[in-house]
Image (cartoon, rainbow, N blue to C red):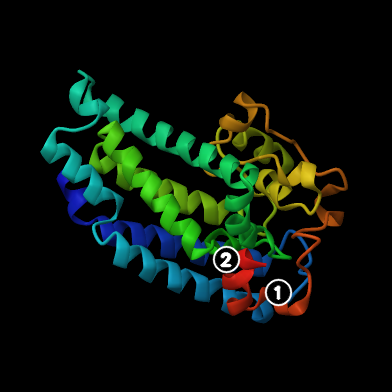
Amino acid sequence: MADFVTLHEPMLRLGAFAVTMMVMACWEGAAPRRLRALSRAARWPANIGIVAINTVAVRLLFPAAAVGAALWAAESDIGLFHWAVVPQWAAIGLSVILLDLLIYGQHVMMHKVPLLWRLHRMHHMDRDVDFTTALRFHPVEIILSAGVKFLAVIALGAPAVAVIMFEVILNSSAIFNHGNVRLPVRLDGILRIIVVTPDMHRVHHSARAEETNSNYGFAFAFWDRLFGTYRKSPARGHDAMTLGLPAFRAPGDGRLLSLLLNPLR
């Protein structure tokens, strides 16, 4: 089974990505959680253009992807789970959890370190939050993130199947929790014990600084509670809250070239 998953890694990742995107696009179109501040036509070209640039950049610099790092570590017998006597199922489960903790910590650093925030703020400049916002990261941030993830995969000696599982979970979760959709209140409350829901993550995109600096989790919700960064809901409620960054609200700020050059401003 592990060999099958590793062999078909690109197809599995792309398939999960495409299915999640289509589901969220249909859900948002049929029942949006919030009224849009801008039309999709005004936002989507730049967001999708950034995805294309990031995909090319990562594939050029890291052609083997993170699973390649995992396979290399296994062949070289490098990493914690290759040195310790750990059952395969435990190595897989722990790798997924620890890699998600890494993403949480990295996300906090992106907000706390001024130079990194210059890169990350492009993600927060979106005046609406929908599934395309999940893909809107500066190419330099994506490259840095990929490099950190590769080093973590090697240091852990994470099994290749765990890396693929983590990539699918992370990408699908990010697209889901950025969705402009509504879950029943009770269901949302149950789900956010374990996973990040759209209402939980939307708080993180508030224009209020104290709300922006909360709810950093991408896939698993328990890190925010564990480290004291959890906020249940925005002060003004989800319908009245303002999204985006106060300093970047001009029409031209959302154009592709302006977004790419924003860290220099």
The answer to whether residue 179 shows anywhere in this view is no
Q: Is residue 144 above or below residue 77?
A: below
Q: Is residue 140 left or right of residue 230?
A: left
Residue that carries the numbered disc 1 in the rendered image? 253
For the residue pair 138 and 131, the one nearer the viewer reads as 138
Quadrant where the C terminus is found in the figure: bottom right
User: Which quadrant of the view contains residue 120?
Assistant: bottom right
The answer to whether residue 87 shows anywhere in this view is yes
Residue 139 image position (x, y, % from top left) = 48, 64
Q: Is residue 200 left or right of residue 161?
A: right
Q: Is residue 32 above or below residue 160?
A: below
Residue 84 image position (x, y, % from top left) = 22, 20
Report the residue at 62% width, 26% height from top.
227
Q: Amino acid at mark 2?
A: Thr
Q: Earlier in the sequence, mark 1 or mark 2?
A: 2
Report the residue at 65% width, 70% height from top.
29
Query: Which of the two marks, 1 or 2, is nearer to us in this view?
Result: 1
For the residue pair 242 and 122, the one nearer the viewer reads as 122
Residue that carries the numbered disc 2 in the rendered image? 132
At numbered mark 1, what does the secondary structure look like: helix, strand or loop?
helix
Q: Residue furthest top?
A: 85
Q: Amino acid at mark 1?
A: Asp
Mark 1–mark 2 distance (CA, rounded to whole Å): 17 Å
Residue 138 image position (x, y, % from top left) = 53, 63
Report the residue at 71% width, 63% height from top.
32
At numbered mark 2, what does the secondary structure look like: helix, strand or loop?
helix
For the residue pair 215 and 26, the one nearer the viewer reads as 215
Q: Is residue 211 above or below residue 21?
A: above
